[in-house]
Image (cartoon, rainbow, N blue to C red):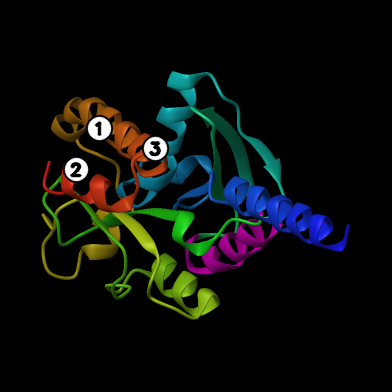
Amino acid sequence: MCKFLIRLFTKKKSIHNHELMKKYLIVGLGNIGEKYANTRHNIGFKILDYFAENESIIFETQKLGDIAQFKLKGRTFIFLKPNTYMNLSGKAVVYWLNKENIPLENLLVITDDLNLPFGSIRVKTKGSDGGHNGLKDIQEKLNTTAYNRFRFGISDAFKKGQQVDYVLGEWDAEENEKLKERLQKASELIKSFGLAGINITMNSFNGK
């Protein structure tokens, strides 16, 4: 009987761990408020909003952010838009990882990147914050630089001393025209992350 109970416990633990591996936290970085909605710095929010609209899922305001759930082929995607403002994003990330018992390797953070051409995609499993305040806070709160991030290029087409205005500025007409296709590509990337894993996703989407 004792051996049977041990096997049963081990099996239940294995099933539990398997279920955890099927949950993913997808974090879009941005600043709350209507005045930031269409700014370059809010591409993380924009990608998640586009995904939610296409899949008819709804965000609800909960602790430290707006949350939505999406299920696909046995996977559960938890989408998070922190409402802590950009430079305090880590607090929300850590809270929802713990609340949903999601392993760190199943975290994907979506952010803008000045060092990439407009619309270009780069997925990495680790790296520096690159001067990005949202990533800096996440790194500090997680106490590691080894977490998955999806950088969306916004280019560096600004004059010296105008970086803040550029980042917090709205997309121009040409960028808006091209954004829809890029947002669709970003949605496909998110699904790939959960279904195919980080390595295949990097190979399939980086530079595309």
Q: Earlier in the sequence, mark 2 or mark 1?
A: 1
The residue shown at (37%, 39%) is 190
Q: Are marks 2 and 1 in contact (CB under 8 Å)?
A: yes
Name the element at disc 3: helix
Q: Closest to the observer: 185 or 114?
A: 185
Left or right of residue 156, residue 128 in this image: right
Q: Are marks 3 and 2 in contact (CB under 8 Å)?
A: no
Q: Earlier in the sequence, mark 1 or mark 3?
A: 1
Magenta segment: 86-100
The residue shown at (31%, 32%) is 188
Instruction: Check disc 2 and give the amino acid type.
Output: Phe
In the image, which is nearer the foreground, mark 3 or mark 2?
A: 3
Q: Position of residue 95 (x, y in %)?
A: 66, 62
Q: Closest to the observer: 15 or 88?
A: 15
Left or right of residue 59, residue 6 in this image: right
Instruction: Check disc 3 and give the amino acid type.
Output: Leu
Q: Position of residue 10 (x, y in %)?
A: 71, 58
In the image, which is nearer the foreground, mark 2 or mark 1?
A: 2
Other-residue count near label 2 (Cα within 10 Å), few / some / many at <14 / 14–19 / ≥20:
some
Q: Which mark is residue 185?
A: 1
Magenta-span inclusion, residue 107: no
Measure how far apart labels 2 and 1 are at the Cα level: 8 Å
Name the element at disc 2: helix
The N terminus sits in image quarter: bottom right
The residue shown at (45%, 75%) is 139
In the image, which is nearer the foreground, mark 1 or mark 3?
A: 3
Q: Is residue 169 visible?
A: yes
Magenta-span inclusion, residue 94: yes
Q: Which mark is residue 195?
A: 3
Disc 2 target residue = 205
Q: Earlier in the sequence, mark 3 or mark 2?
A: 3
Q: Position of residue 208 (x, y in %)?
A: 12, 41
